Amino acid sequence: GAVVSQHPSWVICKSGTSVKIECRSLDFQATTMFWYRQFPKQSLMLMATSNEGSKATYEQGVEKDKFLINHASLTLSTLTVTSAHPEDSSFYICSASGGQGGPYTFFGSGTRLTVV
Amino acid sequence: GNSVTQMEGPVTLSEEAFLTINCTYTATGYPSLFWYVQYPGEGLQLLLKATKADDKGSNKGFEATYRKETTSFHLEKGSVQVSDSAVYFCALYRGSTLGRLYFGRGTQLTVWP
């Protein structure tokens, strides 16, 4: 199947700093990318949907100024957690869809963010 | 709206036991249904899928049948292995937003030797 690379796989940062997570589709053009957050022992919470070249659509309750999403090309989307706080510590997962029709969406391996 | 309900976990089984993880859904029309598996510290991997009623998805000994009359997509495996220990997510795709999946809350499976 198609490959989605997510980087870094884990990161530790200090409170107040910003962290950028990258999500790349390696062998297909991702017209749509999704960012999820997963709390321990819970399901995936969709944070936002991004389409290449346009602003991301955020789910209700997600702070768009805190979680900046950029989808500047058909192979790359980034999530930047700004002014991180310990409560932002979580597992973040991206997925990418190539728009072939049907639910062909592929997941990155996730990023474990720890804010200290 | 669209939603998925999964049985509460965790599920603990001995090796070679029979596995069933229940999943029911709510959606308008005819969604596609999926099971994803997440191994510790990793992202999600597609395990199997079914795109229309009465379809049976299967992979690695796991099976699930799309039952429209009961709006269910239960995951089964006849003989589990220790390596099947993971979190399993049921999900549906409705098509309104290409690629957007609705997930159940996940079921933790632990298999003991």
Image (cartoon, rainbow, N blue to C red):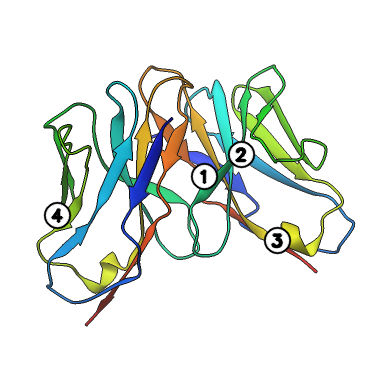
Please rate how many residues cluster around mark 2, counting C-alpha atoms within 10 Å: few if below 14, some from 14 to 19, many from 20: many
Q: Disc 3, disc 4: CB below 8 Å?
A: no
Q: Disc 3, disc 2: CB below 8 Å?
A: no
SS for callout 1: loop
State the separation of the CA atoms marked 3 and 1.
18 Å
Mark nearest the camera among 3 and 4 is: 3
Q: The residue marked by circle 4 belongs to what chain?
A: B
Mark nearest the camera among 3 and 2 is: 3
Mark nearest the camera among 3 and 1 is: 3
Please rate how many residues cluster around mark 3, counting C-alpha atoms within 10 Å: few if below 14, some from 14 to 19, many from 20: some
Q: Disc 2, disc 1: CB below 8 Å?
A: yes
Q: The residue marked by circle 2 belongs to what chain?
A: A
Mark nearest the camera among 4 and 2 is: 4
Task: Inspect the image, locate mark 4, and give the three-letter code of the amino acid beneath it.
Answer: Gly
Residues flagged by tags 4 and 2 on a common chain: no
Task: Inspect the image, locate mark 1, and give the three-letter code of the amino acid beneath it.
Answer: Gly
SS for callout 4: loop
Task: Inspect the image, locate mark 2, and give the three-letter code of the amino acid beneath it.
Answer: Cys
Residues flagged by tags 2 and 1 on a common chain: yes
